[in-house]
């Protein structure tokens, strides 16, 4: 990032120090441990998103502080309740600007991640972030989740799958669960808890080999058996089926 671009986005060194303190304060209050370099790298990542936003329409955030609060700290929410130990292999489906996959990679560099994004320009941006921040064991797959989930290379190969603002819960279940190993879990960022889901959605999770945990925040679905080969279907077909559940369940999480 150039000096000029830092001035344009308000991303000077002093601002980075402020945002680093914000990250450290959140981590301390949330009881989440972070590697020493993580707060600075997270602030730099947020600055890259803001800088690229006008060209690629990556986020609704307009300031560095807002990007850190929303994109970075919001992405770390599952670490307050779920363990991501060394060697965990995870996928971020519908990654967009790298959310939540990049912040999670910076918080847990001993894990390995695959960020799935269908739009080429956004996928290219994530690759640039990975290279500029030198994030280890993080790769990008440019393609549709329903296609990649049917490949032998990726199907049922992950310990964890994360989904943030990717689509309705019903759709996310069918996209995410086929990627998981038995014993893994899917985390859906949501204001809802697992216990809030109606029968039509929890039954769909069961059909896909999952079991919904009732607690929160967010929705956690454990993979308890293999997903039938018929899934996932194409996105339009899944969403049409989801429409019978009612308007509030069609909206994104």
Image (cartoon, rainbow, N blue to C red):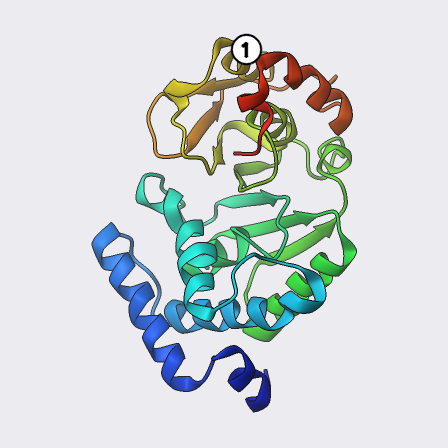
Residue 38 to residue 32: above or below: below
Q: How many marks?
A: 1
Of the pair 207 and 244, the residue shown nearer to us: 244
Left or right: 144 as drawn, with respect to 110: right
- Pick the quarter of the image with the N terminus: bottom right
Left or right: 117 as drawn, with respect to 216: right
Does residue 108 show up? no
Residue 25 to residue 101: above or below: below
* Image point (43%, 62%), residue name: 66
Does residue 236 show up? yes
Of the pair 68 and 126, the residue shown nearer to us: 68
Image-quadrant location for residue 38: bottom left
Image-quadrant location for residue 167: top right
* Residue 106 screen position, x and y as percent: 46, 61
Tag 1: Cα neighbours inside 10 Å, few (<14), some, or many (≥20)? few
Residue 70 to residue 54: above or below: above
Disc 1 is placed on an element classified as: helix
Residue reaching furthest bottom? 3
* Image point (63%, 52%), residue name: 96
* Residue 127 screen position, x and y as percent: 67, 64
Left or right: 131 as drawn, with respect to 150: left
* Residue 253 screen position, x and y as percent: 52, 34
Of the pair 214 and 153, the residue shown nearer to us: 214
Label 1 belongs to which residue? 200
* Residue 115 screen position, x and y as percent: 63, 50
* Image point (41%, 29%), residue name: 192
* Image point (58%, 45%), residue name: 92
């Amino acid at each position: 990032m150039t000096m000029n671009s830092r001035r344009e986005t308000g991303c000077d060194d002093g601002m980075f120090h402020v945002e680093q303190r914000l990250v450290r304060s959140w981590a301390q209050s949330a009881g989440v441990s972070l590697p020493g370099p993580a707060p600075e790298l997270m602030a730099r990542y947020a600055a890259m998103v803001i800088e690229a936003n006008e060209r690629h329409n990556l986020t609704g955030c307009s300031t560095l502080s807002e990007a850190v609060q929303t994109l970075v700290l919001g992405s770390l929410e599952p670490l307050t309740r779920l363990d991501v130990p060394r060697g965990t292999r995870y996928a971020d489906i519908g990654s967009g600007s790298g959310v939540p996959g990049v912040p999670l990679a910076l918080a847990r560099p001993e894990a390995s991640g695959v960020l799935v994004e269908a739009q080429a320009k956004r996928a290219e941006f994530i690759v640039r972030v990975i290279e500029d921040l030198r994030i280890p064991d993080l790769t990008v797959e440019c393609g549709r989740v329903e296609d990649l989930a049917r490949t032998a290379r990726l199907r049922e190969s992950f310990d964890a799958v994360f989904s943030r603002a990717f689509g309705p819960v019903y759709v996310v279940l069918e996209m995410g669960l086929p990627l998981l190993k038995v014993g893994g879990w899917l985390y859906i960022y949501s204001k809802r808890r697992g216990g809030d889901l109606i029968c039509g959605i929890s039954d769909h999770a069961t059909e896909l080999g999952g079991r919904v945990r009732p607690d929160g925040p967010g929705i956690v679905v454990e993979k308890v058996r293999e997903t039938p080969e018929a899934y996932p279907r194409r996105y339009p077909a899944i969403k049409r089926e989801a429409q019978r559940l009612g308007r509030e369940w069609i909206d994104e999480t």
